[in-house]
Amino acid sequence: MSFLSLDFILYIAIVVGVYFLAPRRYQWMVLLFSSYGFYLFAGWKLVFFLLFTTISTYTTGIILGNLNIICQREIKSKEKQLERKEKKEIKQKYNHKKKVWLIICLIWNFGILLFLKYFPFIIAPINFIFEITGISYEIVNRTWMLPLGISFYTFQSAGYIIDLYRDKFEPERNFLKFALFVSFFPQIIQGPISRFDELAEQLYRGHRFEYTRFKYGIELMVWGYIKKLVISDRLSIITSTIYSDPVTYSGFYIVLVVILGWIELYTDFSGGIDVARGVAQILGIELPQNFRQPFFADSLAEFWRRWHISLNNWWRDYIFYPLTLSKTFTNMGKKCRQFFGDTTGKKMPIMLALLIIRVLNSIWHGAYLNYFWGGLYHGILIALSFLLEPQIKAIAKKLKINTECMSWKLFQYARTFFLICIPKIINTANSYDEIFLFFKCLVAKFNPWILFDGSLYNLGVGRRELQATFLFVGIGLIFSIFQEMGYSVREKLDEQNMIFRWGVYVAAICSIVIFGVYGLGYDVANFTYMQF
């Protein structure tokens, strides 16, 4: 069931009605049945993957929780006789057992994810080895149906297990409640990736119907649909037209497609998140913010702190910090300090960890070499900016550059956007030949007049629709500016007169109906990140 279908709207209406009519102590059960009902629409066979992740992480969580309890009891029963060293040895013994269970659970779940998502890339080197060694056998390449939201619920469940290993909270011992945490349907398609200690209590407690919360949720959903149907799907027609024939659409067309490609991706992904957060907010549940005006980032590192926040926080907390605090990286830091000096040497392990995170993030989006190069590009630039930060500040101070004024901020925004646009061509191309072709076509012509002479109306989108799309891009930019300044657009709208407010509501809904890419016979594209 797509977020874009009328079936989804009807489903939400039924769920909301049943949810608030049910006694509050049973509302979590309504959410559980609704979540699995929603998932069954995607295909009943795929539910088994969701159940496997739920059962394996629940069981491992109980084991980890019990080991924590046993460890504490053993120390407490012998506390007077034990020395500090002996207490540490007992903790290490149980930590070793916990680590074994943690690794087994992570291998099970990420193994399934990697197998289903990257099967063609796993067998390719194996078949190559068979070929060069003369073995007359070939593993048949199959296209596996990727279960809905498998990346998101796998990462969310893995975070739960790792937090239990760290003894951050007690395990959830009610299996059905834990199943709800894993499968909560508004977020299972596109995220955000939530933490157990932030989401679980909201899911399990009852909620009264609140008009303001209901209204805010509807507003967020409507804005999400505008982003997707009016902006992203229109822009995708233009970008696909240019990308399909870069020889014809060369020069500033390539510049345009890279810029519009980022806007398309942002409105697609953030639009889906807005719908998910809007539905959850209607039900009284606050999902974490996943985007924070990413195009107002003043550096690449800041961009990734604002883009897909929940995933990047996951990388930070469960990969980056453990890497930088590990014995291997600590020893590496010591050796680097001896070789490069204290200032540079202590930064080297952090730079390597930053590089690993960015490459992992890119490969998560696709196991292609162009994604790897894109991740490497971001990782190297972020690592270098971290290394050279003192020198850059010193140069700015020596040149007497005012780094607090608006013009400098605008320069930083433009610089960051330029830097993220470079690998966009690399990630979009299907081969190295295409990459070279795109860059060749980029410099083949100097034709900036296409932006003003009506050429854009020949890219598959009519004048009226394109003007409406750019109008809403401008509105989105204004909203982002207000949000960057700390204002809530919805709260500001609440302060206006009723006639004005309802005029905005009607105009927004009419814009979706009139300018949205939808209709009979049109197979509307799913939100981009549903495939992950």
Image (tube, grey):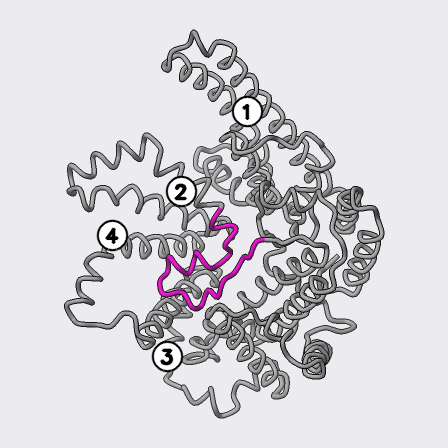
Q: Of the residues shown, which amino acid type is indicated by label 4?
A: Leu
Which callout, 2 or 3, points at the residue further toward the start of the chain? 2
Distance from disc 1 to disc 3, alpha carbons, whole Å, reads: 58 Å
Nearer the observer, 429 or 340: 340
**Dot placed on the residue nearer the N-terminal end, 4 or 1:** 1
In front: 310, or 446?
310
Q: Which mark is residue 320?
A: 2
| Residue occupied by mark 1 | 101
Q: Estimate the x, y position of residue 6 in percent, counting from the top left.
A: 79, 65
Nearer the observer, 9 or 403? 403
* Res. 387 mark: 4
Identify residue type, mark 2: Phe
Which amino acid lies under the numbered mark 3 shown in the image of this protein?
Ala
Q: Which residue is mark 3?
A: 444
**Residues drawn in magenta:** 288-313
Chain-order first, disc 2 or disc 4? 2
